[in-house]
Amino acid sequence: MLIHNVKGHYHFLTGIDPYSCGVVADEGYEIVHITLTQPIPWRKGFMHIDTYLQAQGLKRTALCAIQLRCPVPFTMDGFIAFNRQYCKVLQEWDLYHDNLNPLARTNVAPLTHPPQESMLYGFSYVRPCDKEMQPTFIIAGAGELLDGVLNPEGIVHRGEIDEETMREKAAYVMGVMEERLLGLGGTWAMVNRVNIYTVHQFNGLIENIVLPKLGIAKQHGIHWYQARPPIVDIEYEMDMRGVAHELYIDLL
């Protein structure tokens, strides 16, 4: 369901408590994506986000998406415990909308140079723009977890990583990406960033599963991160966005 977050000037697709499935800016507003040149501990990161938004003349409610990096994948119980801490910060910031978390999120574990603790890697916020601008959006990260429900039994082919199984996992996630894209009112022509997070490489997975779906969006290429999804036994994750402005900054 697409819900209007009036105070944030964006709509969001309902997800689960730790994150929404995606966000799209209202008319007259745009989503700007920020990648940090140097990730910082996530709690400290929120303090720096607050300072940054104030400097832009924006309120905390402009924050609409978060990107995190964790040391290793969590157990399911560990992931749920981390989310309680994370969601508490969002609630303290008064970002919830009618008891729903509107912020999109991606949280993955890098294979090389992993952090020592969970880090803020990037964030997105909403600001006023020219009304003629094409809608901008962020699609939250999703792995092969049925309906996004935090239950180990819902992992597609849990514990299996052979080539055919990985194709099925990728196909499932690709379907989730398309469903969220359409749910936000977007089209593939509006997508200009596609990210894949997995440590597995199989011939034909990208060519046969991902590229055929992208349409014209394939002209922007695909960004592959050697990273694991945030939960043990989930092997493949994606997220996407369509924005006009991306910045690389140092918040420290």
Image (spheres, helix red, strand yellow):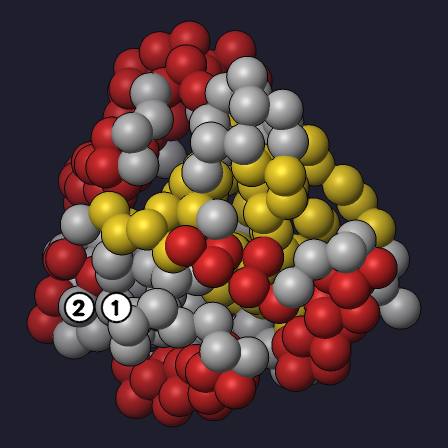
In the rendered image of this protein, does residue 118 appear above or below residue 222? below
| Callouts 1 and 2 close, C-beta under 8 Å | yes
Task: Indicate the secondary structure of the residue bearing disc 1.
Answer: loop
**Residue 81 figure quarter:** bottom left
Whether residue 119 is visible to the viewer of this picture, yes or no, is: yes
Residue indicated by mark 1 = 16
In the rendered image of this protein, does residue 137 appear above or below residue 233? above
Horizontal side of residue 95 vs 14, given as left or right: right
In the rendered image of this protein, does residue 137 appear above or below residue 79? above
Q: Which residue is at 47% across, 72% downward?
A: 95
- Please name the amino acid that badge 1 sits on: Ile
Residue 37: horizontal and vertical position, in percent?
82, 54
Residue 214: horizontal and vertical position, in percent?
36, 19
Q: Which residue is at 42% across, 68% downward?
A: 230
Q: Which residue is at 38% across, 62% downward?
A: 102
Residue 158: horizontal and vertical position, in percent?
17, 63
Residue indicated by mark 2 = 149
**Most extreme residue toward the left, as rendered?**
153
Task: Indicate the secondary structure of the residue bearing disc 2.
Answer: loop
* 234 and 247: which is toward the camera: 247
User: Distance between the Cα atoms at labels 1 and 2?
Assistant: 8 Å
Label 2 neighbour load within 10 Å: few <14, some 14-19, many 20+: few
* 102 and 75: which is toward the camera: 102
Foreground label between 1 and 2? 1
